Every structure is written in structure tokens, then in C-alpha cells.
Image (cartoon, rainbow, N blue to C red):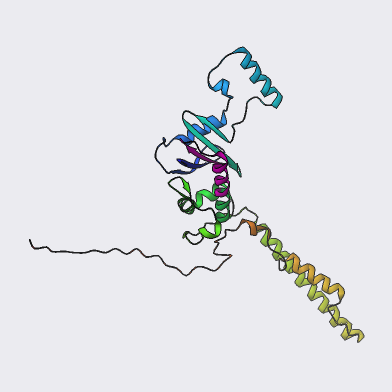
Amino acid sequence: MISQFFVLSPRGDAIVTKDFRNDLPRRTHETFFRLCKFWRDDDERTGMTSTSRGDAAAASRARRGTSSASAPAAFHADGVNYLHIKASGLYFVSTTTTNVSPSLILELMHRLARVMKDYCGVLSEDALRKNSTLIYELIDETIDYGYAQTTSTEMLREHVCNEPVEVGNGMGGVLMSAKVDSTKIAAGAFKATQRVENMLKNNLGVKVNFPTKAAMNLMNAASVASGVNRVSSSATQKSVVSTTSAKTRDEIFVDIIEKVNVTINA
């Protein structure tokens, strides 16, 4: 079904490359990026210079309001079928030399992007590079010799052994400092109520039973601000197999090497 699968950065750099059938050149991703980046319509690519066809192509581009056409999700060039999607600014591309269903391959790539996001936490160039071993393991479990096997995140958890390297988005320190500041404010407010209570009791003989309704509202606001009653906004950027969000699996992997010395008498 699929001959090659690769993920390209917005600059055309190959982040992930996987050749399943070895029936196409290894630099196919460079050809794809050139075709996609400098896409021209069929008449221009085939070298036809008819005035009527050129005028029609120019009029079509004028109606679209662009200087050139954008590459479709599936196209054919030099005997190779290219199918691609864009997710988080990255190109997910599959190539094949056979006649396959485009909708099937495009849906497969959408699911591959979702699985990579689930395991890496975020779908970005940095995350894929830092988790390259995990990404290749996911591809091996998802596609076998170009044929799709499974794209279920839950089913893949039973077969994937590598742990992800989580990539932050630069907001962790900001969120942590905000949480610490809100905790300090709440602690200071409670100490102030205790001083007021002691002053009224010692000087005026008035006994005040805290917390009052206002104090309860303050406690609720402090708990929400400190993140006690809500999930952090960064929870969506955690891997489904993150060691910080789940129990570490008690597993050990050992390579067993056997050596046998045999003496044979003829």
C-alpha cells in the first residue's frame, strides 16, 4: 500500500523517514517538497504553452487571488503518487507506486499525527526530534510493510516500550510562579484574619468565630487560584505514557546472549 512515509518541517527538512518497500529513491521527500513548494497547474508542469490554456490558467489564478496554485492533498508526478496532510505546521507525507484510495491514506496520516501527539504530548518539530526512537517504534507498530495495522493509542500502549521525552512550551515557570504567589496571598489572608480575631478577643472581649462567609469565599478563591480544584492548562500537553502523570511500570529489559562450545569427533 505505502512505499514511504516521512515527516517534513516547514523548511523541508526530513524529521522522520521510513521506507517500507525500498522501491523508490531515498531522496523522494526532496522531490515532494520542491513540487509542493513551487506547485504549478497541470498545463504548466507538462510544458504546454498554448495561449488559450495559459490565459485560462492565469484567469483561474486571478479568480483565486493568488499568484500560483497550492498543491492538492494527493497528486501524481513521475510515476509516484504523493499524498500529504499538514498538522501543526509539519508535512505528513506518504508515497506509493500503486493505485490506492486517497481518503484511506489521508485518514491514516491524520491518525498517525494524533498518535504521535498523544505519546509526545505536543506535536512539534522539537518534540519529534527528541522522541525519534519512540516515533520510529510507533511507526513500526502502526504500519507493517506499508499496510496499516492499528492506530489505537490504548492498544499501542501494550507494545510500546520507550518512554517519551516531554517538551515544555515555556509556560511551566510562569504557571508555577503564579501558583506560588497565589498560595502566599492566601496564607497571608488567613494570618490577617487570625490577628483580627486575637485583637478583638484580647482588647474588646469580643469573640469572633472565623471563618465567616467572606472568609469561606476567600478560601474557595484561593484554592481555585492555587490549582487545587482545577486541572492545569498544560495537562493537554502531557504524554499518555508520561512517568510524571502515571505510575512507572516496574519492568526491566535484559539482553540474553548464549554461547555454546561444541566439540565434534569425526
**Relative to the observer, which residue lies in front, 104 or 39?**
104
**Relative to the observer, which residue lies in front, 188 or 119?**
119
Q: Residue at x 53, y 53 (%)?
A: 151
Q: Is residue 98 magenta?
A: yes
**Relative to the observer, which residue lies in front, 73 or 214?**
73
Tell me if residue 166 can be seen: no
Q: Is residue 248 magenta?
A: no
How many circles with numbers are drawn on the protein?
A: 0
**Relative to the observer, which residue lies in front, 209 or 82?**
82
- Quadrant of residue 41 within the rendered picture: top right
Tell me if residue 53 can be seen: yes
- Quarter of the figure that contains the C terminus: bottom left
Image position, residue 52 (x, y; %) = 63, 14
Above or below: residue 134 compared with residue 83: below
Q: Residue furthest left?
A: 266
Image position, residue 203 (x, y; %) = 90, 84
Q: Which residues are magenta?
A: 91-112
Image position, residue 111 (x, y; %) = 57, 49
Q: Residue at x 55, y 16 (%)?
A: 48
Image position, residue 6 (x, y; %) = 49, 42
Q: Is residue 95 left or right of residue 237?
A: left
Above or below: residue 116 compared with residue 44: below
Q: Is residue 95 left or right of residue 255?
A: right
